[in-house]
Amino acid sequence: MSIPFLLEIGTEEIPDWMIVPALNQLQNLFQELLDGNRLEGRVTSSDATPRRLVLRAEGILEKQQDIEELVVGPPKSAGAQAADRFARKNNTTVDQLTTQITAKGEYFSFNRKTPGLPASELIGSAMPGIVAKIQWPKAMYWTGKGGFRFIRPIRWLVALLGDQVVPFEIAGVKSGNLTRGHRRLGKSEIPITIANYEQSLAENGVVLSAEARRKRIEDGIREFHVKSDAELLHTLVYITECPTPILGSFDREYLTLPHEVLVTVMRHHQKYFSVLDAAGGLAPNFVAVMNTSADPEGLVRQGNERVLRARFNDARFFYDVDQHKTLADRVPDLAHVTFQAKLGSYLAKTERITALAGSLADLVGADRAAIERAATLCKADLTTEMVKEFTDLQGVVGGLYAKAQGEPEEVWKAIYDHYKPVSMDSPVPSTLSGQIVSLADKLDTLRGAFQIGMVPTGSKDPFALRRAAQGLVKIIVEGCLRLSLAQLIGNDPALRDFIADRVKYYFREIRGFKYDEVNAVLASGWDDLVDVQARLSALQAVRPTENFEPLAASFKRIANILKQADFEPAAAARVDTALLEAGPERELYDEFDRIREAARSTEYVHALDAIASIRPNVDLFFDKVLVNAPDPNIRQNRLTMLHQLLTEFSTIADFSEIVTQ
């Protein structure tokens, strides 16, 4: 008989961004418990609110199946004492032993039966360990130092196998069948069964399903023209148990502040959706999501409006104070702001960025003067009151202040954008000047960090170097910047490997190219990432054609032949056409010579089509010609031709890296 299981871990409020990873771990750990203990069953669902992690499983056996196994002991010729020792070792007597006849003779044996344990006992004994294994970015003790560690104090535990409680205890909290409702809308003790669990929570103000909470929020904000924000929506789903959107307003006079400031205050500090007017501009409204069912007297709305008004007043004060000093006048103040202890102040970093940005400007033919001006001012907003209070606005504030202070558009936009891209989903800077300043900033950080040995290890990356490297790759490719990575990286092999890993990640995971295509193209060089993208696109386009993958298999064969022959051609080695046999060998060489120029074209689709067209000649050559001919001169000539074929046609991609059927 199989039965269902329900687990609920009730806690103080868990940070929203930690919940989904914890649920995934809990599912995996519990499934491992079932699989490792022969209980069958599978995890069917998991869900969470800020105050509870919930897991369900179905098809669990009431107890393990009994195990019967034949244990072979010592040979009969070893005598009675050996038989007695074997029997005692297996908790039986000599008269219960049997004889096993093998090719080597007769042996004492015993049919050992191991009764299966009840599922409740196995699950109960394992649960404290499973809960303890959930990895959190941070954890806390609440029963004293050295006690149980978890993200927040555990306040109650529900564990039901069928209609029975699975008994266990964690940090003084015993499992049972009592859950808790919403802090304000529900009861503090609610007896439940597996069948009525979700309905009981709903009756006590808790919407258990994250998808149901998401839909409740989306339905509630649909009547308002809110600024789309998937990340904020996700946060609100996981900080509420009974989400209800409400519309609030603020005085229009605050719209004289930069809209970026207003949106940041609403989004990051208050977790409000911004509301847009009919023209797509910012309206003097916001949508808050309260964690209760209704606000009939408008008290929650009024409270949110009051808090937001205070925040906006702070922002206006900071904005006015900051205007008393220009960004240019603030640059010397960066000497008192530390970038990194071993790498100096932000003033030192600014000087390095400016020099590097100027050099990059020359390489791409950009306006050096404008770029150097933007680079000089790009970090100055770190000394402003606005950025000290609203750190998410660094760069943006600098760009807005530069615009207000009369800097040219090319300069203020570059400052505004220079922290972009902040993720792989966000855009690169919108102007060439912004791309160059952003590249210089990220490259300086990478060079400096690797120079002092701050190399990311495992999941630890306190200086966000992976993000900096990923941004560098994204800007070069999507900005179509013809820059040499070798020049940018320099002679640091660790940094080179680090960037190479980010290049692979970008083209595989972000751009969606197959892993073997990426490996093949990068094996033929990755100094120019714009060229890498062109070669990858061509390879992807030509790969489905009938000749391509068979040719790739042939190239792999050529590479293996050359490797097995330990072939190293002389620098000026040429194919001696006089030694070529008439028929397939000569035809392959002639076809190779005919398409050589086409294969060198930077119109890569055309070049790859030309290369793929040689496939029938390669196949016929291997069918009819013995590469390792007895005559050493002929053998050397054939190996030279194959080497030239492989080398000449591998400038776009190393076809031996392509995985073929």
Image (tube, rainbow, N blue to C red):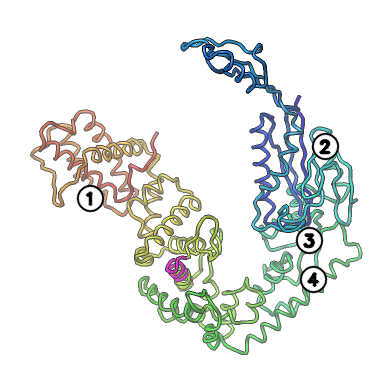
Q: Secondary structure at mark 1?
A: helix
Residue 23 or residue 544, whichever sits in front: 23
Q: Which residues are magenta?
A: 444-453
Residue occupying the point 43% across, 77% down: 352
Work out how far the residue at label 1 is from the one at label 2, CA to CA, in angstroms: 77 Å
Residue 464 position within the rendered picture, expressed as x and y whole percent measured from the top left: 53, 64
Callout 1–callout 3 Cβ contact below 8 Å: no
Determine whether 240 is above or below 342 in the image: above
Apparent side of residue 93 relative to residue 334 in the rendered image (left or right): right
Report the disc number at residue 165. Answer: 2
Residue 333 shows up from this direction: yes
Q: Amino acid at mark 3?
A: Val
Q: Find disc 4 in the rendering and name its residue.
A: 249
- Give the mark, 1 or 3, whose residue is nearer the N terminus: 3
Of marks 2 and 4, the one in the foreground: 2
Q: Secondary structure at mark 2?
A: strand
- Give the mark, 1 or 4, whose residue is nearer the N terminus: 4
Of marks 2 and 3, the one in the foreground: 2
Determine whether 43 is above or below 149 in the image: above
Q: Secondary structure at mark 3?
A: strand
Residue occupying the point 47% across, 50% down: 508
Work out how far the residue at label 1 is from the one at label 4, CA to CA, in angstroms: 69 Å
Callout 1–callout 4 Cβ contact below 8 Å: no
Q: Amino acid at mark 1?
A: Glu
Q: Find disc 3 in the rendering and name its residue.
A: 289
Work out how far the residue at label 2 is from the one at label 3, CA to CA, in angstroms: 36 Å
Apparent side of residue 631 relative to residue 30 in the rendered image (left or right): left
Of marks 1 and 2, the one in the foreground: 2
